[in-house]
Every structure is written in C-alpha cells, then in structure tokens.
Image (cartoon, helix red, strand yellow):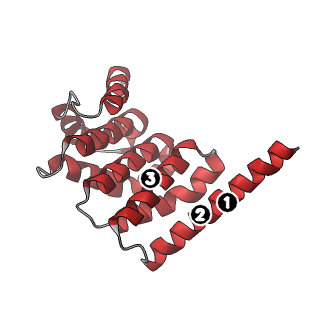
C-alpha cells in the first residue's frame, strides 16, 4: 500500500512539473537556453516513457514548444530532434498528419544546415528513420525524405542513434 501511495505522489509531482513547464512555455517566460534545454529534455523523457493517456495529453504541447523555440543552440536542437523522433514513433497515424509538416520541416532543415554538427544531425536522421518506419504512408514526399535519410548514412557521431537507424533501415 505504501508503494502505491508513493507512486501516486510521484505521478502528481510529475504532472505539476509538466504543468509549470507548459505555463512557462505559453507565457514565454523561459529565456535562458539552459531552462529551455532542461524543459525539453524532461518532456522528451516523459513522452518516451509515459503511458499512452499521458503521452496524448502532452505531445501537442511539446509540438507547440518545439515550434516556438527559436535557437541555434545545438543541444536544444538535438533534444527537439530526439523528441520529434518519439512523436514519429508513438503518435497514431491519423493524428500525425496534423503535425507532420512542422516536424519534417524542422528535421529536413537540420539536415540541410551546414552549421549543425554530427550529433544533432544523427538525432534528426534517427527521427526521420522513425518517420519512414512508422509514418511513411502519410506523405507524398516519400522520395525526397528517403533521399535525405539515405544521404546521411552511415551515422558517425551518435552510436546509440546509429543502432536505431540501422535497425529501421533494415526493416523498412
């Protein structure tokens, strides 16, 4: 019984933290890159490990945060790309259509940007790989997206992401 009460308290605390992050996002209170990065990383983990009900409540706000985040900070861009990969994997196809253009524009923008380094590009390619694997029938631009994806293989910086991308590539 004690473990159940602790679990309930932890879930309530997490919901409060997410609520605070979302309020700060909506009011545009977060100013420093570190605040943005910490919030995005927290949301990445929450989206990655939450149950479907919690995921569906939070992912639309993650998209709003990602779109509103204007930065050249590679750590933030890498975390956003990772989060978008989670969305590519977990958002149902019928709901994904509504956010697809925002996500793919961001990811292809990272691929095309010569000033962005390897880890960030590897995370973007991982997200594109997840898109191709889980959402590919949602687009008419499949050839363009596949070309972007194939042009960046093999991934050289982020070995963990490379394993995921390789698996997606082989299963596609």
When the figure is inspected, residue 143 is found, relative to residue 106, above or below; the finding is above
Instruction: Looking at the image, tell me whether mark 3 or mark 1 is earlier in sequence order.
Output: 1
Q: CA distance from mark 3 to mark 1?
A: 17 Å
Tag 3 and tag 1, C-beta contact below 8 Å: no
Q: Secondary structure at mark 2?
A: helix
Q: CA distance from mark 2 to mark 1?
A: 6 Å
Residue at point 75%, 48% (across, down): 7
Name the image quarter holding the N terminus.
top right
Across and down, in percent, residue 125 comes to: 28, 39
Tag 2 and tag 3, C-beta contact below 8 Å: no
Q: Quadrant of residue 142?
A: top left
Q: Which residue is mark 1?
A: 13
Numbered badge on residue 53: none
Task: Report crowding for label 1: few under 14, some 14 to 19, many 20 or more residues within 10 A (C-alpha).
Answer: few
Tag 2 and tag 1, C-beta contact below 8 Å: yes
Question: For this rendering, which residue is in front, 14 or 162?
Answer: 14
Q: Which residue is mark 3?
A: 41
Residue at point 36%, 30% (across, down): 160
Q: CA distance from mark 2 to mark 3?
A: 13 Å
Q: Secondary structure at mark 3?
A: helix
Residue furthest toward the left? 114
Name the image quarter holding the C terminus.
top left
Q: Is residue 59 visible?
A: yes
Q: Is residue 130 left or right of residue 27?
A: left
Across and down, in percent, residue 50 comes to: 60, 46
Question: For this rendering, which residue is in front, 63 or 137?
Answer: 63
Residue at point 65%, 50% (across, down): 53
Q: Is residue 141 visible?
A: no
Q: Which residue is mark 2?
A: 17
Across and down, in percent, residue 42 comes to: 49, 54
């Amino acid at each position: 019984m004690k473990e159940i009460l602790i679990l309930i308290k932890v879930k309530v605390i997490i919901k409060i933290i997410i609520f605070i992050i979302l309020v700060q996002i909506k009011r545009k209170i977060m100013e420093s890159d570190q605040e943005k990065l910490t919030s995005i990383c927290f949301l990445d983990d929450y989206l990655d490990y939450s149950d479907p009900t919690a995921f569906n409540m939070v992912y639309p706000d993650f998209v709003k945060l990602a779109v509103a985040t204007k930065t050249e900070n590679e750590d933030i861009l890498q975390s956003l790309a990772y989060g978008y990969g989670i969305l590519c994997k977990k958002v149902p196809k019928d709901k994904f259509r509504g956010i697809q253009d925002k996500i793919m524009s961001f990811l292809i923008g990272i691929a095309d940007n010569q000033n962005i380094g390897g880890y960030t590009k590897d995370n973007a390619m991982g997200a594109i790989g997840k898109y191709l694997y889980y959402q590919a029938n949602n687009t008419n631009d499949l050839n363009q997206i596949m070309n972007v994806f194939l042009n960046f293989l093999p991934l050289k910086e982020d070995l963990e992401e490379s394993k995921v991308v390789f698996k997606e590539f082989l299963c596609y």
